[in-house]
Amino acid sequence: MTSTSSPQNLARRFPEEFLFGVATASYQIEGAATADGRKPSIWDAFSHMPGRVKGGDTGDDACDHYNRLEADLDLMAELGAEAYRFSIAWPRILPDGTGAINEKGFDFYDRLIDGLKARGIKAFATLYHWDLPLALMGRGGWTDRAAADTFANYAGIVTKRLGDRLDTIVTFNEPWCSVYMGHLMGVHAPGERSMEAAMAAAHVTNLAHGLGVQAIRAERPEIPVGIVLNAMSIMAASDGDADRKAAERANDFHNGVFFGPLFEGAYPHSVLEGCPDLARNIKAGDLEVINQPLDFWGLNYYTPMRVSDDASTAFPHVATAPAVNPEKTDIGWEIEPRGLSHVVKDLYGRYTLPDFYITENGAADNTEVENGAVSDTMRLDYLATHLSVAADLVAANYPLKGYFAWSLMDNFEWAEGYSQRFGIVHVDYATQKRTIKQSGHWYRDLIAAHSGV
């Protein structure tokens, strides 16, 4: 083991109050899709459509976390996790998206949060990690302006009921994915391929965030509130003028559509000009609502986005440029730890941003169990190199307060089904047996060294 991957050496580079956690999402791990009053989400519908998810996989059972909650909480404690980032399944709380509250859904999250508190683990809740109640899709889902108020209603209900025991609340996880992958590329639920739909969904999601923050603060003003953004670390394919301008347009389209309204109260001019569908959705007062002061934000980073100029494509008129590093994770994503520092420095140079957490970072490493162990050395190296960059950012006075490994356990990886394993704990889906991987033992040692255990 090199000095850079020694958990003890790495631990010393983080301040005492720095938080180390693990992350999951409801649809990816809970299973129990029809249990205790839960109704379908758009991902239930999407994953059951032929040809949408690799292998025809669905989240019907996933990791059966719903029924294995206590054992999974013990697993987190065994790893030494100081915080757990989880998402609340809207269809468990309000099965029709609005209207009647399902108390049995709240019972599950009561047990989850109380279980975290009993083990001394901080509770970081996300209100929306892509599982929109299917009933709302009939009204247009995120392209329907009324969905913003519906989300705010849900946010207020959850905050009132669970907020006394939560350490932070996040409104949305990765709106880039739910907006662009769901409405422009068609590879995520609801599977639309329309710039018009994507622009409507972008604005309605941003508006829902602003109204959601207001609803949360109206119930419990003391809880830190934020949003999680998978900001793209956009790198131009060359130093040429055309490629540099292409990278700027890509920045506006992929990052500015969210960061601009949230932190500056304005959409990027280039997107308003290049995507006229966007402006049609903006009403007077919307940007003031979206631009709520936040206590923190979360960054999810995995791989850079390399772009070159391509006038033949739709806005932002870019093409995907080839990877620079030959090393890739098993999902095919380029491994580039410098992309993490690049995107952080770029964003703090462009916007006035509050404290942040790295809310997701990890690697698809599909190493299987051999003789009761999983030697996932690629993932271990990935985590070590990216955490080293995180330590550099702290040393350079960027306000980074914590790091959450994605993911606690192997799970349903959206359109990839169960074909990609991101967990630091292996899940045998046939038996639901959990096995801590080499990377999980390493992460446990890092946390123990950091906390002086």
Image (cartoon, grey):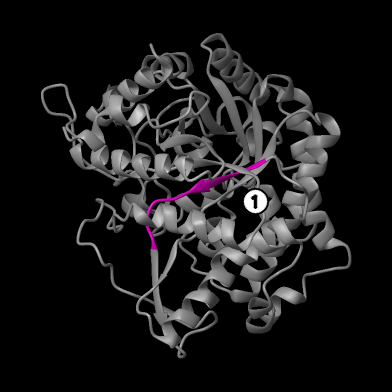
The residue most toward the bottom is 312
Q: Residue at x 24, y 30 (%)?
A: 6
**Residue 25 vertical placement versus 71 (above, below):** below
Quadrant location of residue 431?
A: top left
The relative height of residue 256 versus residue 123 in the rendered view (above or below) is: below
Q: Let me know if residue 147 appears in the view.
A: no
Q: Residue at x 68, y 83 (%)?
A: 273
Residue displayed at 29% across by 72% down = 322
* Residue 412 falls left or right of residue 168: left
Image position, residue 146 (x, y; %): 80, 56
Looking at the rendering, which quadrant does residue 3 occupy?
Answer: top left
> Which quarter shows the N terminus?
top left
Q: Along the horizontal axis of the image, is 80 left or right of 204? A: left
- Position above or below: 114 against 383: above
Residue that badge 1 annotates: 353
Count of residue discs: 1
Residue span colored magenta: 296-304
* The C terminus - image quarter: top left
